């Protein structure tokens, strides 16, 4: 069974892009890990863990906003998307690089290799 249905993902992405983002993505993870460390035949340590949650990333121009949550319900994901979208709406500065001066310049060979 998938972590997110296509309907939930669509609703979350729609909410994420609601304030003018150029691109949005969702990352969701639910994974378990178990590690047993042994030294000379004896158990040194045993650790288990779970990674569970989701993140919503929105790109606007050259800027990125990210929000995460461990609430994978529709309302939890929409809240994360809404928070990220609100942050995107506050990005008013244009940080695009200035590409108007693209003149070619000669580079100087500062470390020539002499072949004999």
Image: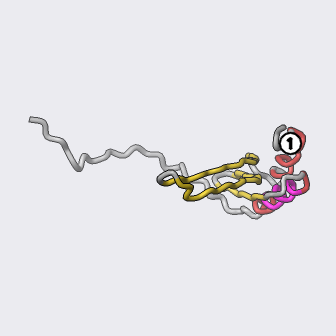
Q: Which residues are magenta?
A: 76-84
Residue placed most toward the observer, 18 or 39? 39
Question: Can residue 84 be seen from the camera position used here?
Answer: yes
For the point 70% across and 51% down, the residue is 59
For the point 86% across and 38% down, the residue is 6
In percent of width and height, residue 32 lies at 71, 49
In percent of width and height, residue 34 lies at 65, 50
Give left or right: position of 84 versus 94.
right
Q: Say above or below: 6 vs 49.
A: above
For the point 85% across and 49% down, the residue is 12
Please name the colour scheme applied to the rendered image. Answer: secondary structure
In percent of width and height, residue 19 lies at 82, 55
Specify whether residue 72 is painted magenta.
Answer: no
> Which residue is under mark 1?
10
Residue placed most toward the observer, 102 or 76? 76
Q: Residues within 10 Å of mark 1 (few under 14, many from 20)?
A: few
For the point 47% across and 53% down, the residue is 40
Q: Quadrant of the C terminus?
A: top left
Q: How many marks?
A: 1
Dot 1: what SS? helix
Residue placed most toward the observer, 97 or 74? 74
Q: Main secondary structure of the magenta part?
A: helix
Give left or right: position of 92 versus 106.
right
Residue placed furthest toward the top:
116
Residue placed most toward the observer, 16 or 67? 67
Question: Can residue 24 be seen from the camera position used here?
Answer: no
Q: Quadrant of the N terminus?
A: top right
In percent of width and height, residue 24 lies at 75, 47
Give left or right: position of 46 versus 103.
right
């Amino acid at each position: 069974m998938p972590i997110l249905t296509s309907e939930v993902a669509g609703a979350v992405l729609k909410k994420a892009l609601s304030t003018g983002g150029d691109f949005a993505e969702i990352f969701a993870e639910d994974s378990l890990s178990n590690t047993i460390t042994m030294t000379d035949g004896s158990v040194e340590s045993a650790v288990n863990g779970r990674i569970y949650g989701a993140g919503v990333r929105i790109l606007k121009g050259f800027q990125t906003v990210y929000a995460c949550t461990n609430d994978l319900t529709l309302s939890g994901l929409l809240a994360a998307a809404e928070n990220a979208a609100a942050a995107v709406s506050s990005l008013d500065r244009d940080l695009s690089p200035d590409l108007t001066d693209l003149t070619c310049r000669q580079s100087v060979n500062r470390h020539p290799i002499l072949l004999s």
